RNA sequence: GCAGGGUUAGUGAAGCGGUCAAACACGGCAGACUGUAAAUCUGCUGGCUUAUGCCUUCGUAGGUUCGAAUCCUACACCCUGCA
């Protein structure tokens, strides 16, 4: 924790900070799109950049499986490989333990996966995950955690996953320190530990304290947006806000609905990542002013000449692509439609973050 | 001209006496999607209406039968051989 994180201002629990990564500074609050396999689906790095995004995610599990970190390292590391100069954050693969749950075995040592496509059996552990993330060349990393669903079956495992996540964090951090010990402070990546505990507040509180007792650079909140109701998620964010170490960044994993982001930002969250803006874009959904959603594939847009949102400053809306055009491209299966709406949706989320950044800064400078 | 095959809902295509308003696919309409096994998945898709209801449909017109998309006859159109 040596000067990599600066708080510019804070108003109530909404924060305006700068995260200094080895690949550049990131202003928060910020939304980071998911480029799971090395690309934000359907977008070029330049298109991603056009949305004002400052960081892109990639996934340890998926890239390990294909093409493998050795190939990526040979191709120059994640930045050169993906053509993305922005700071890159890799997720640990912990979420895949959860999302691919029916094809894995979890032991204390780690997790055994079977690739649903190739049948390849692979093993992931806290050490392995960190090693892969180093090999990939990530600027920010996430410790390998144990995520559980919030359905009845998952809830039975909440305590177990909670405890294991902390044991795994200890191992993740040890491996992280081992692999970064020869790096200069400004050259080393940042590591986020993950809070778990399901919807159990006592466990969540304990988890927050335990994770923050470790020498991790950032706090990630995991295990939310995995099937709970919006009220349950918001309630947990309300509960956690007073428990965070304010001197470290707070990263809410997997949340990217506008309403949830606004709720999170007001409760101390600095960073978000989510597949929602891009996945839903490919499925024809666009957010418009007021956090409302429109389904561009709907017949009513057939002859609609207006852009997705006339108040939007994204390149898709600025270039005047009409709803009617986008609907047509969706109906004929043209990938361009998903691309154009992905740009719009990511920009929409990024603009939400900017609206929470700007007022705080201007308020502060006004006070000065 | 002769012989054979075919004509089914928006399209393609099953069905070959009752359990057929008619499989399935596509198309159409709508919904879902929150650390991406996701350009995916789900529902509806003759009409009226929402009921274990009625009505109209399987090229056209007749017929057989308690009952026909399914059998018979004629006609129309299409395809393939032989002339």
Image: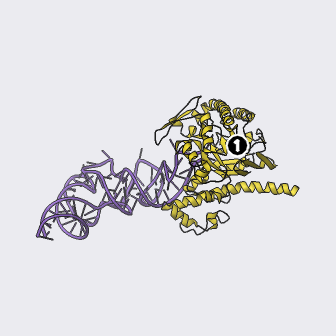
Residue A217 visible in the current orientation = yes
Residue A153: image quadrant is top right
Using the image, determine if residue A209 lies above or below residue B83: above
Q: Residue tagged by mark 1?
A: A188
Q: Nearer the viewer, residue B68 or A170?
A: A170
Pick the quarter of the image with the N terminus of chain A.
top right
Pick the quarter of the image with the C terminus of chain A.
bottom right
How is the protein colored in the picture?
A: by chain
Residue lying at the far right in this picture: please name it: A368
Write down the chain letter for disc 1.
A
Count of all numbered marks drawn on residues in the image: 1
Which residue is drawn at the image coordinates 52% and 44% (left, top)? A66
Across and down, in percent, residue A34 comes to 61, 49
- The yellow one among the chains is A
Across and down, in percent, residue A213 comes to 75, 33
Q: How crowded is mark 1: few (under 14 residues within 10 Å), some or many (20 or more)?
A: many
């Amino acid at each position: 924790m040596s000067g990599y994180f600066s708080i510019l201002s804070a108003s109530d629990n909404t924060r305006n900070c700068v995260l200094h990564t080895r690949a550049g500074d990131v202003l928060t609050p910020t939304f980071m799109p998911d480029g799971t396999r090395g690309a934000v689906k359907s977008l070029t790095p330049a298109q991603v950049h056009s949305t004002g995004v400052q960081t892109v995610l990639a996934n340890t599990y998926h890239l390990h499986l294909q093409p493998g970190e050795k190939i990526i390292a040979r191709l120059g590391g994640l930045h050169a490989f993906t053509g993305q100069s922005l700071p890159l954050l890799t997720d640990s693969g912990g979420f895949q333990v959860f999302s691919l749950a029916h094809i894995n075995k979890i032991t204390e040592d780690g997790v055994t996966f079977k690739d649903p496509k190739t049948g390849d059996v692979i093993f992931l552990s806290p050490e392995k995950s960190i090693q892969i993330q180093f090999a990939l060349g990530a600027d920010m990393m996430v410790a390998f955690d144990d995520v559980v669903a919030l359905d009845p079956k998952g809830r039975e495992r909440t305590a177990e996953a909670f405890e294991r996540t902390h044991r795994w964090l200890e191992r993740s951090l040890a491996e992280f320190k081992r692999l970064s010990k020869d790096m200069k402070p400004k050259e080393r990546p940042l590591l986020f530990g993950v809070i778990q505990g399901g919807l159990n507040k006592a466990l969540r509180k304990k988890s927050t304290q335990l994770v923050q007792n470790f020498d991790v650079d950032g706090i990630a909140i995991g295990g939310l947006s995995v099937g709970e109701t919006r009220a349950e998620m918001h309630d947990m964010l309300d509960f956690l806000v007073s428990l965070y170490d304010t001197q470290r960044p707070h990263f809410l994993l997997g949340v990217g609905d506008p309403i949830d982001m606004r709720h999170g930002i007001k409760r101390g969250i600095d960073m978000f990542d989510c597949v929602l803006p891009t996945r839903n874009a490919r499925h024809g959904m666009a957010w418009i002013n007021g956090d409302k959603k429109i389904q561009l594939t709907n017949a009513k847009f057939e002859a609609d000449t207006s852009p997705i949102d006339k108040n939007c400053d994204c390149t898709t809306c600025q270039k005047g692509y009409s709803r009617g055009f986008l609907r047509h491209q969706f109906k004929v299966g043209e990938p361009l439609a998903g691309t154009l709406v992905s740009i719009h949706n990511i920009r929409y989320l990024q603009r939400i973050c900017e609206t929470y950044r700007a007022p705080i800064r201007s308020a502060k400078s006004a006070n000065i």
